[in-house]
């Protein structure tokens, strides 16, 4: 049986960020990293670009073997944790191997949700969460004439764009009345929707798939509105859910994800969780929520790693702020913060540009833009620090980028 | 792990001319449009702020990159962007809280500062000294592996730079050293040790204030007779050097003893209760030049110790400041080499947080202001080349900026400030005269003195 001081399950942003934080504090303690993928660490976020062919699969590795060697980390790939004995501090791998650990980080991420659509399980479809998925989709692109994408979230929209660029006729079916509903309001989404429509992508919004069935070499997708869509490629991108199945019976408290406190500690002794698998408090609302975005994974991983290694400089998780960036057909959309945690103090939109600023008590709570330049990292910091913008309110509303940079340079340079 | 060079910005010197941005845009995008500049100066009323890449030690842009397109170069510390890997997702811009990596519409991807390979165009374009390229990191890379010859836990006052001076200098001088630390702050903080253990990893002794240089003379000559190459070094305060210690110091310098004498000048007897010394400047409060109904600080000007030592025609004499560490190290190296041939004297200014009355975190800034206001000038001397300024004395900071930073000058009247201003100007003229080889100026000054 392998013994390790730190066991990290998962190998993407949260896991790597934790590993680095541990090594900052503890240069020698043994670390083992286990990932279910038989690949070097990669980011799920890069996968749409593997699909499009922009990123070669062999060039997306975030770390290589030499890096693991340099950081004295045992890296086990292609093995999932199948069972956990939290009391005995032991993890069992799909390879049969058992690992005894001192401290454990769960950074297993999330896996695609399959919606309960009748017939879905019996047809051929794609998902996009692993490098294998991406490579399969990439190979399918040239032969795809008609594609249906279920879900207009980030994964679905990226894939729809790539499929359209590859020459397929694409239809996106989304239950919500607009695309990217988690990040943008109706006006902003309509700019994105228009860009897709201009490229011939058909968006069926507010629509629900009622049934899937095999039709010839492909799939026939029926919607509530009695439309029947024929596809030689079906992509299910209806969201993701934390990977927690192996924790059944382990005693680790789970709601939708692994419940963690402000230092990413789970309910079980010696177990932390970070990234898409973790359910931590929100920034605007103390209730614990999933905030499965890359920047949160990096932050949570760092906090978990520092806490695990006993780094005295660890600072508590400030709460998850929803944020993301989205590029589509060469345009840039950025969403930082909450749409509805304050009042809209500026909003303007035309066919190509959009800017909305939301404030409460002269503090920024959200800023959203399409093709309007501002620094999302600076805005995030303004929100987290709850900086009083009263003295510069007008200037900030008029020119958020410049004013925020000025505040940054004076406050945390 | 290495230390890295960096671009530094001093907003107080910036007038918003935008030359840096034009230079950057021209160098990086071939267009003078400042929107393409990777350094962004932001006007904020009358002052200026800066947004640019900090080349962070633990960069979040790199951690946030899903495509491994960003990496920190171990050799030069620059965060590099690989266009062949970048997928334009902009998540790096979410990670950066400094506006240092930004989407550029003309380029069609994010751009960031790459320090121009160590020769930044923006710095070269800045005529007002608001931007500088700091290469002090080289010191760490050069001497970081040398052994620290003091024990941990020396008990200096909070914010004191003397411990820094001691550790830096001895690390460079090396272990083949006998060290003298006459009464003052340096033994006071534990360098001679407690309870039979020394605070150094080299032989150290605690001479009287009066006989530091004579005792070192004996030690050095003894080892020479034995055929051993040993550095004889003094780390002394200004009181020990300039007052009762002066006759032995002057004698050793005149005889050309092979000694390295470092005077750490905090302008008084600071560890015994902040009494005045002959190095205390005019107007300064000390416990023996009090401020009250009749007193208004010291009524005499400071003795110019380094100039006096220069007039001994020593093998090497220099002044240095911990705000200018590269200069300090350069002079230290020359002083060490000179001490193998004759007497070397290094005068290092040491602002005293306790005795000069300023916040403990501002020591280096006070040291910097002293130099920038010409209250202290940085120069070096050897008998062959004469005196040479190592830092330009033109475009000096106003003397007020220095005086206002210190509590010991808080009481000064306008007349006193004018006196100090005049003294500074006289000193600058005198040193410049020497530096420019105007020997008549030197002769005139000397006769004026007599």
Image (spheres, coloured by chain):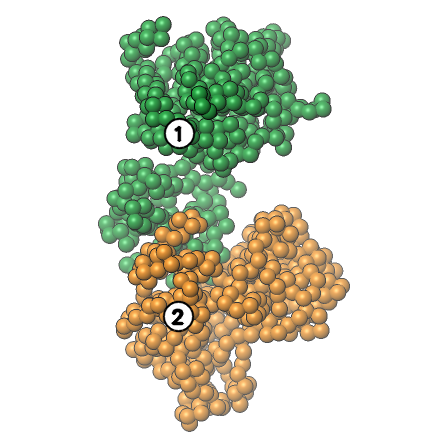
Chain colours: A orange, B green
Q: Which mark is residue B105?
A: none
Closer to us: A310 or A363: A363
Which residue is most to the left? B32
- On screen, residue A142 versus residue B24, left or right, reads right
Secondary structure of the residue carrying tag 2 is: strand
Asked whether the viewer can see residue B142, the reply is: no
Q: Which mark is residue A343?
A: 2
Q: Residue at x 36, y 40 (%)?
A: B10
Q: Chain of mark 1?
A: B
Q: CA distance from mark 1 to mark 2?
A: 49 Å
Rendering quarter of residue A151? bottom left
Tag 1 residue: B403
- On screen, residue A29 versus residue B244, left or right, reads right
Rendering quarter of residue B13? top left
User: Quadrant location of the N terminus of chain A?
Assistant: bottom right
- Badge 1 and badge 2 both on one subunit: no
Q: Residue at x 49, y 47 (%)?
A: B57
The x and y percentages for residue B287 are 52, 22
Up/down of A4 relative to B221, above or below: below
Which residue is most to the front? B293
């Amino acid at each position: 049986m392998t013994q390790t001081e730190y066991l990290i399950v998962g190998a993407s942003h949260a896991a790597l960020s934790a590993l680095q934080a541990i090594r900052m504090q503890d240069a020698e303690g043994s670390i083992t990293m286990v990932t279910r993928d038989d690949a070097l660490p990669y980011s799920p976020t890069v996968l749409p670009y593997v699909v499009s062919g922009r990123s070669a699969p062999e060039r997306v590795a975030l770390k290589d073997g030499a890096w693991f060697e340099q950081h004295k980390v045992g890296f086990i790939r292609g093995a999932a944790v199948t069972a956990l004995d939290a009391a005995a501090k032991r993890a069992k791998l799909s390879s049969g191997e058992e690992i005894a650990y001192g401290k454990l980080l769960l950074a297993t991420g999330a896996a695609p949700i399959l919606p309960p659509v009748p017939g879905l399980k019996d047809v051929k479809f794609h998902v996009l969460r692993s490098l294998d998925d991406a490579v399969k989709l990439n190979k399918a692109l040239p032969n795809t004439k008609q594609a249906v994408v279920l879900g207009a979230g980030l994964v679905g929209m990226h894939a729809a764009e790539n499929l359209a660029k590859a020459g397929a006729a694409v239809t996106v079916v989304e239950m919500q009345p607009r695309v990217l509903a988690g990040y943008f309001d109706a006006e902003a989404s309509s700019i994105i929707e228009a860009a897709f429509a201009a490229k011939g992508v058909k968006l069926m919004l507010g629509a629900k798939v009622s049934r899937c069935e095999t039709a010839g070499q492909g799939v026939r997708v029926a919607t509530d509105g009695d439309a029947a869509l024929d596809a030689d490629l079906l992509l299910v991108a209806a969201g993701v859910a934390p990977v927690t199945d192996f924790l059944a019976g382990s005693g680790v408290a789970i709601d939708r994800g692994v419940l963690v406190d402000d230092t990413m500690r789970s309910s079980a002794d010696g177990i932390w969780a970070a990234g898409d698998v973790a359910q931590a408090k929100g920034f605007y609302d103390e209730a614990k929520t999933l905030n499965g975005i890359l920047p949160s994974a990096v932050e949570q991983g760092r906090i978990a790693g520092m806490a695990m290694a006993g780094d005295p400089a660890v600072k508590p998780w400030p709460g998850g702020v929803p944020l993301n960036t989205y590029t589509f057909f060469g345009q840039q959309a950025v969403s930082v913060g909450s749409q509805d945690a304050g009042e809209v103090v500026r909003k303007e939109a035309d066919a190509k540009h959009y800017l909305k600023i939301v404030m409460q008590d002269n503090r920024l709570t959200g800023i959203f833009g399409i093709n309007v330049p501002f620094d999302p990292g600076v805005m995030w910091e303004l929100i987290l620090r709850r900086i009083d913008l009263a003295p510069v309110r007008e200037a900030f509303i008029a020119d958020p980028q410049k004013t925020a940079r000025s505040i940054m340079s004076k406050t945390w340079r | 792990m290495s230390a890295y060079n960096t671009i530094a910005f001093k907003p107080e010197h910036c007038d918003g001319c935008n030359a840096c941005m034009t230079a950057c845009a021209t160098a990086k995008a071939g267009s003078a449009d400042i929107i393409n500049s990777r350094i962004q100066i932001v006007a904020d009323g009358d002052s200026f702020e800066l947004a640019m890449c900090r080349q962070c030690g633990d960069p979040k842009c790199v951690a946030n990159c899903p495509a491994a397109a960003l990496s920190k170069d171990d050799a030069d510390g620059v965060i590099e962007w690989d266009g062949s890997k970048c997928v334009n997702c902009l998540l790096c811009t979410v990670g950066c809280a400094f506006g240092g990596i930004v989407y550029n519409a003309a380029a069609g991807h994010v751009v960031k500062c790459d320090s121009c390979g160590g020769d930044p165009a923006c710095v070269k374009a800045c005529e007002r000294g608001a931007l500088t390229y700091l290469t002090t990191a080289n010191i760490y890379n050069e001497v970081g592996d040398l052994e620290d010859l003091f024990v941990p836990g020396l008990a200096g006052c909070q914010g004191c730079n003397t411990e820094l001076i001691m550790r830096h200098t001895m690390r460079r001088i090396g272990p083949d050293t006998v060290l003298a630390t006459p009464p003052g702050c340096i033994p006071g903080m534990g360098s001679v040790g407690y309870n039979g253990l020394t605070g150094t990893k080299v032989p150290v002794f605690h001479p009287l204030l009066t006989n530091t240089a004579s005792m070192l003379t004996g030690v050095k000559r003894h080892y020479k007779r034995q055929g051993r190459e040993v550095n004889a070094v003094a780390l002394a305060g200004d009181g020990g050097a300039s007052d009762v210690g002066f006759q032995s110091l002057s004698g050793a310098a005149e005889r050309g003893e092979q000694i390295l004498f470092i005077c750490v000048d905090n302008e008084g007897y600071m560890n015994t209760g902040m009494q005045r010394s002959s190095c205390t400047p005019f107007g300064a409060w000390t416990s023996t030049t009090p401020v009250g109904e009749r007193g208004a600080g010291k009524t005499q000007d400071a003795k110019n110790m380094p100039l006096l030592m220069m007039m001994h025609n020593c093998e090497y004499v220099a002044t240095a400041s911990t705000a200018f560490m590269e200069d300090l190290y350069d002079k230290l190296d020359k002083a060490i080499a000179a001490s193998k041939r004759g007497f070397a004297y290094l005068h290092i200014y040491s602002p005293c947080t306790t005795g000069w009355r300023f916040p403990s975190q501002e020591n280096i800034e006070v040291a910097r202001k002293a130099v920038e206001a010409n209250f202290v000038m940085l120069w070096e001397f050897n008998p062959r080349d004469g005196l040479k300024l190592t830092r330009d004395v033109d475009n000096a900071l106003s003397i007020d900026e220095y005086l206002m930073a210190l509590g010991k000058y808080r009481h000064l009247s306008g007349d006193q400030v004018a006196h100090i201003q005049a003294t500074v100007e006289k000193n600058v003229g005198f040193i410049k005269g020497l530096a420019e080889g105007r020997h008549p100026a030197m002769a005139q000054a000397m006769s004026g003195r007599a």
